[in-house]
Image (cartoon, rainbow, N blue to C red):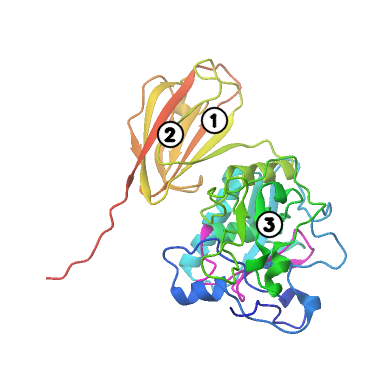
Amino acid sequence: MLSRSRCLGKNMKECKWNDTFPNKPSSAPSNLWLRYFHPFFFTTDSSRYLQEGDIVPRRSRSAFNCRNCYWPQSMDGIVRIPYVLDPTYEENHVRGILEAMAEFETLTCINFVKRKTERDYLIIRSADGCWSNYGKVGGGQTVSVMKGGCMWKGIIQHELDHALGFLHEHSRSDRDKYVKIMWEYISPADRPDFRKFENSNNLGLPYDYSSVMHYGPHTFTNTTGKATIVPVPDGSVHIGQRLGLSNLDVAKINKLYNCSRCSTIIDAAFGSLKSANYPRNYSDNTNCVWLIRTRSRKISLHFRDFDLRRTRGCQGDYVKVYDGSSKYSPVLMNKTCGSQIPTDVVSSSSLMLIEFVTDGADTASGFQATFTSARMQRRFNTRN
């Protein structure tokens, strides 16, 4: 196996090696996959090593429990993080990055906003690999999202999560209760990526095998087919994914940044959802979202019961459905209220967002819905 990347630049902010995919995306070109799964850029200056594979180290602040590393919250409770994008990104790259950012805005109190004159901001650019600083460091700080190799939603969110102040999930102080690190299958140069931070801030929330911040089972293995991380006590538990933020990822962001956002991610091929307290009346001043996420399947949403206070234009209480993962996605069902059950809605992709908003006036019993999914048919060009 090739040696692990160490450093490419003359200053610490240029020092990097590539983060890793937990599992190879099915569409990943084999040469890119090999490059990112087995990175091999390095120099001999060990003082410039990245921590955990994709985090630029700090010299003066703790890299695992830093109170000064977080972005400030505005008076309205929103955490606005300015950014600039690399002008060399093509339209599809920009779209992918903005979609990854939009999920943060939908599910948490984090809003990424275009920089005006702010002193502290993110510089999102296509450098060598996928890497980030840990938390807010001051001034313009790089988040590297390289064209091609890093352009998956979960990878972009992984690096943005580092910039928010989060380390890898398998580096938590309590990780030994949940995973076993198989050191014999990890080359010495790669072992720092699997270090445990004894004083990590776990926010009082459970360990998350499905976190977008968790390595996959074979990350940096030096022996084909041998796992470097094994869940305990049940070794069959799936670990690591790059589809997008998990429920606990969202909960951790909201807790760290003191946000009361009501949001739920449903990773399933079928299931149900309902308004709070259903069939009793829902509460005033509610703003909740459900993100349904399947694997390569269209989603069909069916309302079994529907009773929301009727107002003109449904400006008070309403349900709205989006064809995607954010409120910037196309609308499948516009604001709907009253007691007539809406017609079924079907997504064009494997993502659907349901939004439920109420005002401070009278309430009603709310809604109950079920969803199913079906494989999306691929279109093939044929030649006569």
The residue lying toward the viewer, choosing from 379 and 289, is 379
Q: In terms of image quadrants, where is residue 250?
A: top right
User: Which SS class for mark 2?
Assistant: strand
Residue matched to label 1: 357
Residue matched to label 3: 168
In the image, taking residue 50 as reference, residue 344 lies left or right, namely left
Amino acid type, callout 3? His
Q: Mark 1 or mark 3: which comes first in sequence?
A: 3
Image quadrant where one finds the C terminus: bottom left
Question: Magenta stretch containing residue 149, yes or no?
Answer: yes
Seen at 61% across and 26% down, the residue is 285
- What range of the chain is rendered magenta? 125-153
Q: Is residue 268 above or below residue 367?
A: below
Q: Mark 2 or mark 3: which comes first in sequence?
A: 3
Seen at 70% across and 62% down, the residue is 194
Seen at 51% across and 46% down, the residue is 326
Amino acid type, callout 1? Val
The location of residue 170, given as percent across then percent down, is 68, 55
Amino acid type, callout 2? Gly
Residue matched to label 2: 271
Is any part of residue 168 visible from this angle?
yes
